[in-house]
């Protein structure tokens, strides 16, 4: 069971062309932190693999009040940029909680969107930040809001002939906080991941984005919990209502990391703590 | 692994049953289906699995048994590929509910080969997701057909 | 399936290896080049025993196709060991009983040197964060933290593989953990 070919396109166009030519049998890989463990274990047996490391998709740039991050920019480099920037501490916190130093030097921001639950901690932060993804295919490019990118369990809006080219993060001065509960303090999959951003005007909360990970088929926004905050002060009762709504919106499953019962309990606890930290 | 569920399709029961027996319809609605033919009660074809880190194509051999038009049947068969083999059967039952169709399905399968090393919950979650996507597509296809004047 | 030649720098030497497609750097280092200081543990990126430096950056060699290091520099604990003895980090591991079975040690030493090249005087918490991707089953980690702290304090610990200074890349800056542990 050997790999026949490892393709290393040197541009996005070349990558799209190779995807078009080889289609369904091609395993597309960025950092390899999701694919290579499965290949090493003999579970994934691709005949052809395409690595995107050289396709020139690793830029990190600011433009027009947005952070434009190439899909194959490593989490390590994005962390550096986010820390330097200091206006996306949420992104920095999420990356810091993911993997380990060495794994962050391989894992990419685009790849994190495809990590099966309970993974995808950076995706949770990106959801709370209102990020969008740029998808590129033979017909051109299209942008899609991150919440519309996730369509189901292990399913995304990516068409079979498309690749994720870029993640775009609007930069604005919203209050933000992130917390990931794991079984250890580091190098651990999530029991539950919570990322929240919001605006406050005269003590009233507006436009909250409450993103949850590891408690559903994919990272998602708890819109009922967001609505519970709208126009209100972040007092105990409001926080409690939002936390409960977030728990109700969750659809956790049992896995080797934690039981569904525990995850649902912890959604409420962690959402409450994060909101309290923003109050 | 075991997968059970219930979905509602906004189409008459007869149309839904007909689609299940029609390879051309299944070709369109089964995610990753690359070719499907019917020979009597036997379906043969290929399905491509396209996950982020696992790709593979399966040869499909499925037979429709115990069919009771237009309300029930069992699909029994095998999907075979480099990354594993799935042997199983799924029973479905259709009920009319005021013009829309309620589908109940109950399937179980034995997975062998490399795929069997994955947590069975992941495989079940994946199967549920593919089935529900397929049934949604079926619903859309039937709705689109109904919208076209005969 | 066509094999191809991949050329890269291992320490100070140029190497050329003939590989099947998608052979990992770990497999090439251990089994083709005899670099058994690069350990094989989980092959999932989770244990850290295969950690090497690629262009000065800690990298799990089990997840990296060797084709992706063509033209780059790879360092292992063996290539980083001075010709005439041990460096302060290695000596500190001996002095502070920073290993028992020794399986995690090459990965630990690689990470320690990479950390000290960027932060010559890290806090104990920072050290713990840096090694959080390296699993040890023997020591309980405290002797490893002692060793790295001592190495930091010892004269002559200027990481020989200090990269062009550009920050800590994949390593967090602030000590405040972003992840809580269940108690």
Image (cartoon, coloured by chain):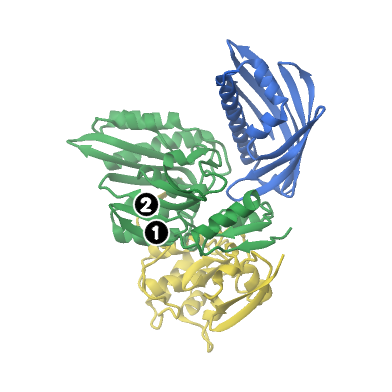
Which one is in front, B79 or B114?
Answer: B79
Q: Mark 2: which secondary structure?
A: helix
Could you tell me how many numbered marks the image carries?
2
Name of the residue lying farthest toward the bottom: C84
Specify the chain shown as yellow: C
Residue B21 seen in render: yes
Q: Quadrant of residue C3?
A: bottom right
C91 up-or-down from B28: above or below: below
Give the quarter of the figure containing the N terminus of chain B. Answer: top right
- Crowding at dot 1, Cα within 10 Å, few <14 / some 14-19 / many 20+, comes out as many
Comes first in the chain, label 1 or label 2: 1
Q: Is disc 1 in contact with disc 2, using a CB cutoff of under 8 Å? A: yes
Residue B46 in the image: x percent, y percent?
72, 41
Few, some or many residues within 10 Å of mark 2 (<14, 14–19, 20+): many
Tell me what hue chain B is rendered in. Answer: blue
Q: Examine the image and state in which quarter residue B123 appears.
A: top right
> Looking at the rendering, in which quadrant would you find the C terminus of chain B?
top right
* Residue receiving disc 1: A78
Residue A134 located left or right of residue B95: left
Of the numbered discs in the image, which one, if any, rests on residue A91? 2
């Amino acid at each position: 069971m050997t790999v026949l070919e490892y393709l290393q396109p040197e541009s996005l166009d070349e990558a799209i062309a190779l995807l078009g030519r080889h289609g369904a049998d091609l395993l597309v890989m960025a950092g390899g932190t999701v694919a290579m463990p499965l290949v090493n274990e003999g579970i994934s047996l691709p005949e052809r693999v395409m690595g995107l490391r050289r396709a020139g998709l690793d830029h990190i740039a600011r433009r027009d009040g947005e952070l434009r991050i190439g899909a194959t920019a490593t989490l390590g480099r994005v962390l550096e940029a986010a820390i330097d920037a200091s206006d996306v501490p949420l992104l920095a916190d999420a990356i810091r909680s993911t993997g380990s130093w060495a794994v962050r030097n391989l894992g990419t921001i685009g790849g994190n969107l495809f990590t099966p639950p309970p993974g995808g901690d950076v995706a949770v932060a990106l959801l709370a930040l209102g990020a969008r993804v740029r998808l590129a295919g033979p017909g051109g490019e299209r942008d899609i809001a991150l919440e519309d990118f996730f369509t189901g369990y292990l399913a995304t809006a990516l068409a079979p002939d498309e690749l994720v080219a870029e993640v775009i993060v609007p930069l604005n001065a919203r209050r933000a906080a992130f917390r990931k509960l794991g079984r250890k303090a580091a190098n651990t999959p999530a029991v539950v991941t919570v990322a929240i951003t919001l605006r406050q005007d005269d003590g009233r909360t507006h436009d909250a984005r409450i993103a949850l990970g590891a408690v559903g088929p994919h990272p998602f926004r708890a819109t009922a919990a967001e609505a519970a905050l709208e126009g209100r002060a972040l007092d105990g009762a409001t926080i409690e209502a939002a936390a409960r709504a977030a728990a109700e919106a969750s659809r956790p499953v049992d896995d080797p990391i934690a039981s569904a019962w525990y995850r649902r309990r912890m959604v409420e606890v962690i959402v409450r703590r994060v909101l309290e930290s923003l109050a | 692994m075991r997968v059970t569920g219930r979905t509602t399709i906004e189409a008459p029961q007869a149309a839904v049953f007909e689609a299940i027996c029609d390879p051309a319809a299944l070709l369109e609605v089964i995610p990753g289906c690359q070719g499907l033919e019917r020979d009597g009660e036997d379906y043969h074809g290929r399905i491509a699995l396209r996950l982020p880190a696992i790709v593979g194509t399966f040869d499909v051999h499925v037979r429709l048994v115990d069919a009771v038009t237009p309300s029930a049947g069992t699909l029994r068969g095998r999907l075979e590929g480099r990354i594993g083999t799935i042997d199983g059967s799924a029973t479905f039952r259709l009920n009319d509910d005021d013009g829309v169709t309620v589908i109940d399905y109950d399937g179980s399968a034995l997975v062998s080969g490399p795929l069997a090393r994955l947590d069975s919950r992941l495989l079940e979650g994946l199967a549920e997701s593919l089935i529900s996507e397929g049934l949604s597509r079926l619903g859309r296809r039937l709705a689109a057909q109904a919208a076209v004047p005969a | 399936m066509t094999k191809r030649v991949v050329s890269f720098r291992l320490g100070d030497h140029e190497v050329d290896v003939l590989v099947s497609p998608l052979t990992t750097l770990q497999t090439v280092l251990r089994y083709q080049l005899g670099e058994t200081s690069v350990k094989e543990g989980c092959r999932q990126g989770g244990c850290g025993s295969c950690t090497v430096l690629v262009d000065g950056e800690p990298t799990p060699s089990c997840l990296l196709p060797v084709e992706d290091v063509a033209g780059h520099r790879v360092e292992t604990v063996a290539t980083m060991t001075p010709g005439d003895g041990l460096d302060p980090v290695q000596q500190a591991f001996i002095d502070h009983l920073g290993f028992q079975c020794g399986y995690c040690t090459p990965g630990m030493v690689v990470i320690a040197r990479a950390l000290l090249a960027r932060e010559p005087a890290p806090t104990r918490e920072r050290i713990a964060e840096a090694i959080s991707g390296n699993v040890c089953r023997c020591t309980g980690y405290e002797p490893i933290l002692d060793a790295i702290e001592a190495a930091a304090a010892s004269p002559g610990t200027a990481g020989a593989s200090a990269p062009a200074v550009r920050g800590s890349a994949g390593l967090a800056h602030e000590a405040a953990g972003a992840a809580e542990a269940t108690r």
